[in-house]
Image (cartoon, rainbow, N blue to C red):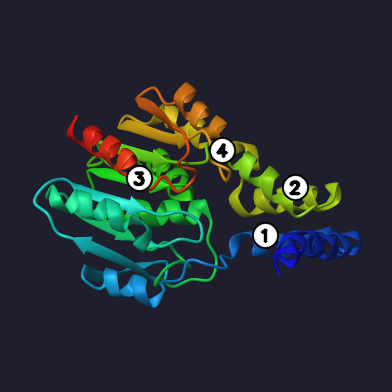
Amino acid sequence: MLNMKKALPKILGFIINTIGLLSPKQSAKIAMQLFSTPLKGKTKPHEQKYLNIAQIENINYNGLNIKTYTWPGNKDTILLAHGWESNSYRWKDLITHLNKLQYNVVAIDAPAHGSSQGKTFNAIMNAACINKIANQIKATVIIGHSMGGMSTVFALYKTPISSVKKIILLGAPSNFKGIFNRYTSMMHYSTKVKSAIIKNIQNTFGQSPEYFSAAEFSKQLDCKGLIIHDKDDRIIPYQDGLDFKAQYKNGTLITTTGLGHGLKSDVIYNHIISFLKS
């Protein structure tokens, strides 16, 4: 089973490469659909049991019901944005810490994740969703893990939110080009298919993959930032954290070791709380 799991990307890549010989446009469409469709991240029963203790609300985003969970408090409002193939439950331990300190905590299930509607997901869509909800709840702080962090930067770069004074990026990708290159390499796509995918992205979003650089966008952010990245992150390279450090004039990088991509640890939570109090 494990060998099959490892071989699957290569098999799918071979099929898409074969389609690309006849129709590059069709191969790119299939590849992007595959890239944008999460296979995990829906809420499991034990996760929902925990989330049910929160105040639950559906917020409409482009016709989709987006699920939000609120743990009320009388301090600043903190919006939590999870990453790819995850959901609001991933924040359970951090929510416990923040709620004890009376922060007003709101977690969001991204489109096509958790209990939110939708079949596909991308950082641009997620950014628009985060922006709408952050405006609606007048968030003071946004904490984003992985793609949630990248989406947070996209959200604030495109349409700044005056209420947001601080953001925290946990293991966040600094640029889309790196994600794209890792994906196409994992799938063993041919040069022809990769070129077709780039053209698809340009036609869909009006820009090439290189344009979508969260680190570059962070130069324009006025809010204070805390960047936390682990040297042993096998999903998003530590270099991405260094990229943010180099570009984000209002950002501070904290480097950890041995915590991987998840960054679930009291060490992390203490750094977050110290930053919130600063």
The amino acid at mark 2 is: Ser
Quick check: 77 above or below 85?
above
Q: Secondary structure at mark 2?
A: helix
Quick check: 247 above or below 90?
above
Q: Secondary structure at mark 3?
A: loop
Distance CA(mark 3)–CA(mark 1)? 34 Å
Identify residue for label 2. Answer: 185
Image coords of residue 12 (percent x, y): 78, 64
Q: Secondary structure at mark 1?
A: helix
Mark drawn on residue 175: 4
CB atoms of marks 2 and 1 within 8 Å: no
Disc on the earlier residue, 4 or 1: 1
Identify residue for label 1. Answer: 32
Q: Residues within 10 Å of mark 1 (few under 14, many from 20)?
A: some
The amino acid at mark 1 is: Met
Image coords of residue 127 (percent x, y): 43, 51
Q: Secondary structure at mark 4?
A: loop
Q: Residues within 10 Å of mark 2 (few under 14, many from 20)?
A: some
Image coords of residue 80 (percent x, y): 32, 52
**Residue mark closest to the camera, 2 vs 3:** 3
Quick check: 245 above or below 120?
above
Identify residue for label 3. Answer: 265
* In front of the other: 262 or 211: 262
**Residue mark closest to the camera, 4 vs 2:** 2
Q: Residue at x 53, y 71 (%)?
A: 119
| Residue 207 visible to an observer of this rendering | no
- Determine whether, in the image, residue 277 is placed left or right of residue 174: left
Q: Residue at x 24, y 70 (%)?
A: 56
